[in-house]
Amino acid sequence: MLSLLFMAKKRKKTLEETVLKIQQGDLLLLNETIDSYKPFVAKTVSSVCKRYIHESDDEFSIGLIAFHEAIQKYSPDRGSSLLSFAEVMIKRRVIDYIRKHSKNQSISIDFTSQNHDDDSPSLAIENEISIVDYQKKNETELRKHEILQFQQILKEYDLSFQDLVEQSPKHADARKNAMEIAKLLVDDQELRTYLLEKKRLPIKQLEDIVQVSRKTIERNRKYIMAISLILINDYVYLKDYIKGVLKT
């Protein structure tokens, strides 16, 4: 068991090192890596489409492009593995493709797949509703995956969703202030690195650059850390929550 864990960690490290070399311009290594991870891409795309994916499928091509994009954009500062980051990006790109494709093709599919006598506005509406339901279902699954992934990251910082519920500032202004502090932390490379490496909030350093007391920072410590991790990572749905609070 221990040997398997060691091998898993070794593979992960090797992949991250490979990505670094690719980002430095090794195109041959890029092609080899993409080719090696085609099964991963196909499996991820298939989980969205709910069917077996062939390499000739458009969705598979979208997945490969997204995987390539993930390799180019990945940074250890995100606090997650390349494959976790790539999985989110692939699913998002495929869902975006399905949305656009369904919207553009829904009416033509409705009328060419049925007998002329069955053509009716109600049939088109029913199919449109089915498409919307399908999109909502996929978005729900992506949101669920995002939350589960974030939950794993929280554990590394000795945090949980229960902590966030209990420690979340009660007043809207206090939540907004905590989020602004988190944004300042993320935008400052030194403070950001401190959080990711030490797994602790740099309270003393924050105290010097924000207009709130040390006591306030300490009281909202867990909440600020969680918001910072959301901002650092590519969490679309969780970021929407932050945007909503900041606009209020």
Image: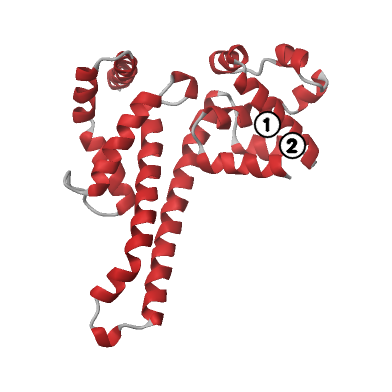
- Asked if the residues shown at circle 1 and circle 2 are in contact, with their CB atoms under 8 angstroms apart, the answer is yes
**Between 61 and 51, the one nearer to me in the picture:** 61
Give the spatial CA distance, label 1 vs label 2.
9 Å
Is residue 89 rendered to the left or right of residue 232?
left
Residue at 74% x, 28% y: name it: 220
Q: Nearer the viewer, residue 166 or 211?
A: 211
Within 10 Å of disc 1 (Cα), the crowding (few <14, some 14-19, many 20+) is: many
Q: Which residue is pictured at 42% across the width and 57% down the height?
A: 135
- Is 219 left or right of 199, judged from the image as shown? right
Q: Residue at x 40, y 81 (%)?
A: 121
The foreground one among 66 and 45 is: 66
- Mark 1 vs 2, N-terminal side: 2
Inspect this view and state whether residue 170 appears: no
Residue 131 visible in image: yes
Q: Is residue 7 left or right of residue 155?
A: left
Q: Position of residue 79 (x, y in %)?
A: 48, 23
Q: Is residue 227 above or below residue 12?
A: below
Q: Amino acid at mark 2?
A: Arg
* Mark 2, other Cα within 10 Å: few <14 / some 14–19 / many ≥20: some
- Kind of residue at badge 1: Tyr
135 vs 228: above or below? below
Q: Position of residue 128 (x, y in %)?
A: 40, 69
Where does label 2 land, which residue? Answer: 175
Q: Quadrant of residue 126?
A: bottom left
Q: Quadrant of the N terminus?
A: top left
Res 223 label: 1
Rendering coords of residue 201 (x, y %): 66, 18
